[in-house]
Amino acid sequence: MTKDPQQDQSAGPTAEQRRRWLELVEVVEDARTRYYLKDAPTIGDDEYDAIFRELVELEATAPELVTADSPTQTVGGARAEMFEPVEHLVRMMSLDNAFGVEELRAWAARVEKELGSIPELLCELKVDGLAVDLVFDKGQLRSLATRGDGRVGEDVTANVRHMPNIPLRLHAAADGAPIPELLEVRGEVYFPVAQFGAINDQRLELGLSPFANPRNAAAGNLRQRVDKRERELAEVRANLEQIPPTNVKALTRAQERVDRLAADLARATDALGALRLVVHGVGALEGTQSHTQSQAYQQLAEWGLPVSDRVAVYGDLDGVEEYVARYGENRHDVEHEIDGVVVKVDDFALQGRLGSTSRAPRWAIAYKYPPEVVRTRLLDIQVNVGRTGRVTPFAVMEPVQVSGTTVSMATLHNASEVKRKGVLIGDMVFLRKAGEIIPEVLGPVVEDRTGAEIAFVMPTNCPDCGTQLRPEKEGDADIRCPNARSCPAQLRERLFHVGSRGALDIEGLGWKAASALLSDSLLTDESGLFALTPDQLLTSEFFTRHTDGVADLNENARKLLSQLEIAKTKPLWRVLVALSIRHVGPTAAQALAEHFASIEAIAEASEQELASVEGVGAIIATAVREWFEVDWHREVVDQWTRAGVQMVEQRRERGPQPLAGLTAVITGTLDGFTRDEAKAALVEQGAKVTGSVSKKTSFLVAGDSPGSKFDKAESLGVPVLDAAGLRRLLDEGPGILPVA
């Protein structure tokens, strides 16, 4: 008997669906962290896309799995902590992908069905760079920010003065079009191909690791605190002038430091000077407006902004396909690396009719070129250990150029995957790369074998701590290091996680700081983090500076200590996330904190009590129960408590809860509200806010460009409120909603 899909959805996700969802979320979030924050990706672009697609499809099958912090509901990665946050005026969205002509045609067919005919389509190259947001106020540059999570990015404005093709002020157009009062544009910062190679050559000469790809090179160089380097150099030079001429030793030492800092600063500013910007979209705009994307590009160029000269507009799909094919065949003839073509509906009014989903516009699509395939020698297969103890083999290869990038490593996932690919150490192997991410090994060139090749044997012991490796449970393809307490690799990952934005958001506790705390023996695990003292930090070179031979705390140390004090007062749910309890992300942590109100109550709750909390379920309940059963986990909690970390939910006195029992979904851009503000207002009055429309949804709040959630709400008969309706609901209560 065939099951009704709708019935399956209404029954809620199965245990297997929840388990797989948690696995996929863990992989996607780890990939994003490595890509956006560490500039060190470890999985291939096509692999990431496949995993993300599976996650999207799973959530479509089981909508109740969708939460506000699901990777499908967010864009990009978190903001790094070394820069001030900048909230974008209009959210920066991602793009849906087409991985072949058939998928491109399917997108075009959907556009044609919605609009009644194929509109004019604009084609532009998809630049392999770092997405940025620029705001001009009355023609003056106000800010340059990275994309971040799509809503909040990093303020890198101070670096603009070293980037020659970014105008500090817009100039009047030749056609007399006035400069807008407010203009927000989106673009891509990239390294031209020639400069990228030179940057990596320089890094190798200095004994530094080369950038994995042009996108990481752009990110690594744009996200530099050149202003801090300048201040440090000025301070050291001033100190140099105070040293008596007779103190030759001190003068020599200080001069060497001045020379070193000056050379570092010169390299940083030279790298910024090599970066280029290309503008490819408009966010907020007050004043002169164009009717089409192509007209907007012409107008932006008139005002002095750098736009691409490779944009083309076609009246049919044949022209688009010809453009895609032409640049696919000549992708390395372009001045910057590309990994595809972006196709947009040219007319802004038609873009508005098509709207957007929660993460991507429906009026645009990114055609991704197939990965480039090259050959190189597999020199060795080694392994690394992640935060959860998962042991992942990776290939070490003879360096080879792939899409303008020198590549020497690629992931191999697990021992079963190595066996499936059939690669041997010493093989000539096929390697592919999609332009953005580190490549993957496809398989061996069998006909080139000499007989000297040897099979890879998965280690039986952890390479970082020596502990015997084993699967977490019977049947798992992955093996893990069970020494979670003291394995150096797991410790580094966990400590970095404590300071991450999704956890305790501790500025100063980045990847390098976490590594220094452990390598310099300031910490043996995360338990002592909040008891760190200035004297301890002074024993680490990473946290010190030397003036006239006297060691003092540097800015990293002072920031870390002050931020640790602030972190002690963070909400309980953030503490739960920071503890690295498997599967416990922000949504589950908030549910637990709200329900139990203290870490002690959570620790003492039964598995059944934990599972009964809405948003938790059996799998997370088991993980929480197992975590608190480990003695040293309890010790971490005890030491944090003794150090002053808040372990009790600070509940506010709640007002009336007129919306209790109602479930809401928010979509589109709301007039007078951010999404977070709208959610907070609804939750304050007792409503539950989810990420997906279903039969259980009480109402949908829809702003501009609502996308598919609006369509689904209409098909299910779910009431839809605009921003004005939301205000009425908050003021007057649920009586304004139609009776079911």
Image: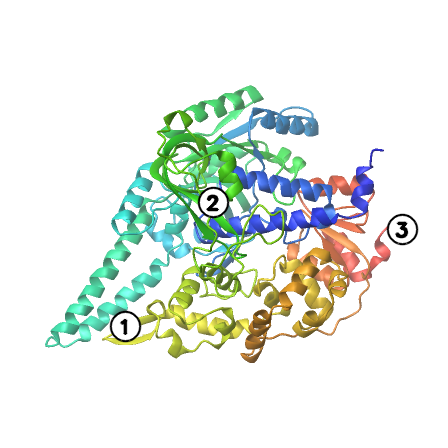
User: What is the three-letter code of the residue carrying label 3?
Assistant: Val
Q: Is residue 611 shown above or below 562? A: above
Reading the image, the residue beneath label 3 is: 739
Q: Secondary structure at mark 3?
A: loop
Picture mark count: 3
Reading the image, the residue beneath label 1 is: 546
Relative side of 311 to 553, left or right: right
Q: Is residue 733 shown above or below 103? A: below
Mark on residue 179?
Answer: 2
Q: Secondary structure at mark 1?
A: strand
User: What is the three-letter code of the residue carrying label 2?
Assistant: Ile
Q: Earlier in the sequence, mark 1 or mark 3?
A: 1
Q: Secondary structure at mark 2?
A: loop
User: What is the three-letter code of the residue carrying label 1?
Assistant: His
Q: Mark 3 to mark 2: distance in Å?
A: 50 Å
Q: Position of residue 114 (x, y in %)?
A: 69, 30
Q: Position of residue 554 (x, y in %)?
A: 35, 71
Q: Is residue 331 shown above or below 206? A: above
The answer to which image quadrant residue 556 occupies is bottom left
Q: Residue at x 29, y 49 (%)?
A: 203
The N terminus - image quarter: top right
Q: Residue at x 31, y 40 (%)?
A: 197
Q: Residues within 10 Å of mark 3 (few under 14, many from 20)?
A: few
Q: Earlier in the sequence, mark 3 or mark 2?
A: 2
Depth check, mark 1 against mark 3: the one in front is: 1
Q: Residues within 10 Å of mark 2 (few under 14, many from 20)?
A: many
Q: Which residue is nearer to you in this view: 592 or 479?
A: 479
Q: Residue at x 48, y 63 (%)?
A: 491
Residue furthest to the top in view is: 318
